[in-house]
Amino acid sequence: MFETIEMAPPDPILGLTEAFNKDTNGAKINLSVGVYKDANGQTPILESVKQARQRVLDTEKTKSYKPINGDPAYGAAVRAMLFGAGHEIVTSGRATTAHTPGGTGALRVAGDYLHSLHPKSAIWVSDPTWANHANIFEAAGLTIKKYPYFDAATNSLAWEKMIAALGQVPAGDAVLLHGCCHNPTGVDPLPAQWGQIADVLAKRGALPLVDFAYQGFADGIDEDAAGLHTLCKPGCELLICSSFSKNFGLYNERVGALTVVAGTPQAAEAVMSHMKRCIRCNYSNPPAHGAAVVTTILNDAALKAQWQGEVKQMRDRINAMRRVFVERLAAKGVKGDYSFINRQRGMFSFSGLNKDQVQALRDKHAIYIVGSGRINVAGMTEANIDALCEAIAGVV
């Protein structure tokens, strides 16, 4: 059965990291995969995570299975982080949460649920969006449609085209929105635009599905939830896919969550009962350790404050590297106005580099960037920024 099988194409993002790891060039730079790096080029373990991890190890009493949808204490902590403990959605009980293996797992469970319970529904994704979104939803059996999002000519949101397209979404379809730090563009809607998005989707009877992978990396933990809160109209329905890879640095622990918001607690529990069926025939139940670390931090005032400070340090370093990147590009004589990079938010920059330039950077300089031109700003350091900008000057 296996003799005639040909190699599958590499993943457009993780495949670059595999190629990077095999590259013997001592000056190589990896700006492809979405992993935070500190000023020394390392992906650190947060001090708050170290303390919480030790506390978990000292107090845990069993390695028995968790419930299909995870520990209830974790779900409560996730909802408090998303909405605030006093939000109507929390106090009314009309939201419930499943612990999933990362944000990717949450997206897949959401896709499986939609395909199983709402088989005629399509899902609309921004153009462009994270490369793995299409893989996940196609594997779940969903029909994928696109709405305009990015204006390459102005390096900004294609607002008029976007809102016009959302105004044509059929009732019952799902619309994927990036909660903040849009991947790959780094361009987010303004607060007033979020309001219009919420109004249009509510009027159309579309289901918002919020991919919330970078909470805290734009302006702050609470500030970055502003768009989500705008969607939370009385009686609203939505799905939220959270990831704690970036803001807790728990990449290889695979800590995510899928939160269902319904009109009533009973409706939320009914939806979750079907999501649990999707989970059971997939990974059965979630891993415990990373979620326990997150729960410990969010439920301890001192640890939570320490964690928030560490998230701010990461956010500030990313924003500082944006400024340095723009300044160095100008200093190296790179043609064009790159000031838009300072207006983008989060880890990624849609740099404007085309596929030929990206390939030339890899072939000539061992600099690895996604083919779309998306650059992970968090992978830049003072040690590699000059070489990066010189190489870009050469290919541009």
Image (spheres, rainbow, N blue to C red):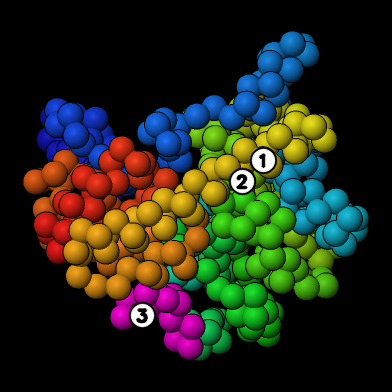
Cα–Cα gap, marks 2 and 1 = 5 Å
Residue at horizontal 25 percent and vertical 60 percent from the top: 331
The residue nearer to you, when weighing 158 against 42, is 42
Considering only order in the chain, which callout, 3 or 1, is on the residue closer to the N terminus? 3
Residue at horizontal 38 percent and vertical 54 percent from the top: 324
Residue 321 position, x and y percent, is: 41, 51
Residue 107 position, x and y percent, is: 54, 51
SS for callout 1: helix
Q: Residue furthest left?
A: 364
Considering only order in the chain, which callout, 3 or 2, is on the residue closer to the N terminus? 3
Residue 263, placed above or below residue 23? below
Residue at horizontal 39 percent and vertical 70 percent from the top: 340
Which amino acid is tagged 2?
Lys
Question: In the rendered view of the protein, which quadrant contains the C terminus?
Answer: bottom left
Disc 2: CA contacts within 10 A as few (<14), some (14-19) or many (>=20): some
Identify residue for label 1: 309
The residue nearer to you, when weighing 379 against 106, is 379
Residue 282, placed above or below residue 187? above
Q: Write the start and end of the magenta stretch as one range.
A: 144-161
Which amino acid is tagged 3?
Thr
Are the two marked residues, 2 and 1, in contact with CB atoms closer than 8 angstroms? yes
